[in-house]
Amino acid sequence: MQSTHQIKTLRLQRAWSQEQLAELASLSVRTIQRIENGEAPSLETLSALAAVFEVSVAELSAESVAGDDSLDQRIVDARLRLQREARFYRSLITAIVVCLLLAVVNYVTSPGNYWVVWVSLIWGCLLAVSGLRLFVFGGVAETWRKARLQKLLRK
């Protein structure tokens, strides 16, 4: 297989042992051994190895030349999606903690006035819109953007 030969060649060019490569890529030595013995690596493993060798995933993969750019783009898109989701969950946790603390302050300072409800509702609505954009309409918008770009490029 092309990718297994390529990985072994790149490793030997750098005079690295399998153990060194495994440590640099945060993989097990057994995974490196399996790849070099002909077993197909996963996309995640290829991504880790490509980062260590400072090459694109497409250069390491055995996919056709036509799909090379799309493979790297899929990895970039997946990482961006993961970052957006992590940012949303951090915002959600922050909102919950702050609203709970504000509820305590509201109860201690003015128990008859429930101003914290307005803050919580506004923040909750903003998070709901953000969540809808990310989880529900994100794919629709991305599909529309790609279709629109293709249409514009055809003109």
Image (cartoon, helix red, strand yellow):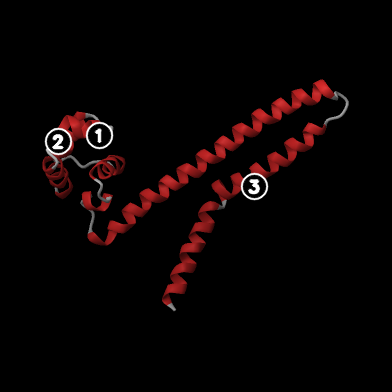
Quadrant placement of the C terminus: bottom left
Q: Nearer the viewer, mark 3 or mark 2?
A: 2
**Residue 17 figure quarter:** top left
Is there a contact, CB below 8 Å, between mark 1 and mark 2? yes
Quadrant housing residue 128: top right
Kind of residue sitting beneath label 1: Leu
Which label belongs to residue 16? 2
Please name the residue shown 41% across and 45% down the image: 79
Q: Residue at x 11, y 40 (%)?
A: 12
Where is residue 126 drawn, in percent x and y? 67, 44
Which residue bears the numbered disc 1?
24
Left/right placement of residue 49 relative to residue 88 reads left
Three-letter amino acid code at disc 2?
Trp
Amino acid of disc 3: Val
* Chain-order first, disc 1 or disc 3: 1
Residue 152 left/right relative to 13: right
Task: Report how far apart the C-alphas of labels 3 and 2 lie in the structure.
Answer: 50 Å
**Left or right: residue 32 compared with residue 119:** left
Front position in the image: 72 or 105:
105
Instruction: Say what secondary structure mark 3 lies in.
Output: helix
Q: Position of residue 70 (x, y in %)?
A: 33, 57
Disc 3 target residue = 129
